[in-house]
Amino acid sequence: MQKDCNLETLAQSVITKIKHYLVVSLGRTAEDAYDEEFYRSFVWALREEIMVNWAATDHAFNDQKVRKVHYLSMEYMPGRQLTNNITNISATDIVQCVLKKMNRPWERIVNIEHDIGIGNGGLGRLASCLLDSLATQEYPAMGYGLRYQYGIFEQKISHGVQIERPDNWLLIDNPWEVRRDFRAVPVQYRGQLSENTNEHGDSVYNLSSHQEVRAIPYDYPIIGYKPSSTFSVITLRLWSTKESPRNFSLQCYNAGELGNAAENTSLTDVLYPNDNHEMGKRVRLKQEFLLVSA
């Protein structure tokens, strides 16, 4: 973050932006805003410089016409973006000054944000570390995954017994993500493949009687660490089938086939469904096909 002016001036600039977003986006003032509303406006204020660097990084890669690394993983564990991003843009002192002036405890604001729930093991953490490193080293890269609604679980102990409950990390809007409907892509399942010949004598293949799922991308900025104003930002793109009404089969629903009606809508519900039964095997295979196809 820019530090060519003093800390007080920078802090006051961020405070002005927070108050602006509270009023114009949420219809609240700094005095009566709930912590959740303050958190959202706080992120929007910090995100301004991040978005500028995000666009600049992408534009620089395109201008240089460099090859890009495309990394695919079924899971990621990036942690809480607020704390990571504040560290990576070297804004810790400014943020502490802002929160002190606005009488908002750091711990209370940080704990509003959920961990991004799209992984539950070493594979996810390794994938996120790789993206962090690529961004820090300014490599032209992009990550791809699935936006699971329940990617991890909460562990409770009741009467000495472990109970697993889904962790709905999307319960509140994530102000870091950017939904890009115009980049949604169709993914086709099943169907019948037929071969024909065009006027040039080449084989042409057509798929009919297939299912089509609409995958919607959500982009997240992955910020490289750099103690200056020009940090690199690469993209983690997560695909979701949950938000598209086209993925819900009204015909199956009206026929009483409720499970089949929501099968494609629920493809990104849970990370790694249990595959000790036929439905679990099918959903896992469809998830993998969704990621590589989208």
Image (cartoon, rainbow, N blue to C red):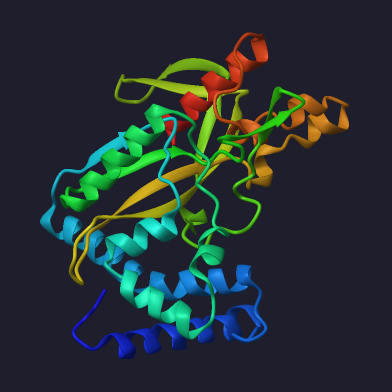
Q: Position of residue 262 (x, y in %)?
A: 73, 32
Residue at left 39%, top 89%?
12
Q: Which one is in front, 193 or 45?
A: 45
Q: Position of residue 75 (x, y in %)?
A: 44, 33
Q: Position of residue 49 (x, y in %)?
A: 32, 73
Q: Which one is in front, 43 or 285?
A: 43
Position of residue 187 relative to residue 227, above or below, is: above
Quarter in which the N terminus is drawn: bottom left
In the image as oriented, which residue stretches furthest toward the front?
160
Residue 283, image quadrant: top right
Position of residue 281 relative to residue 259, above or below, is: above
Q: Say how many tags the image has.
A: 0
Q: Position of residue 171 (x, y in %)?
A: 66, 52
Position of residue 287 relative to residue 84, above or below, is: above
Quarter in which the C terminus is drawn: top left
Position of residue 98 relative to residue 292, above or below, is: below
Residue 40, image quadrant: bottom right
Residue at left 50%, top 16%?
194
Q: Is residue 293 left or right of residue 111?
A: left
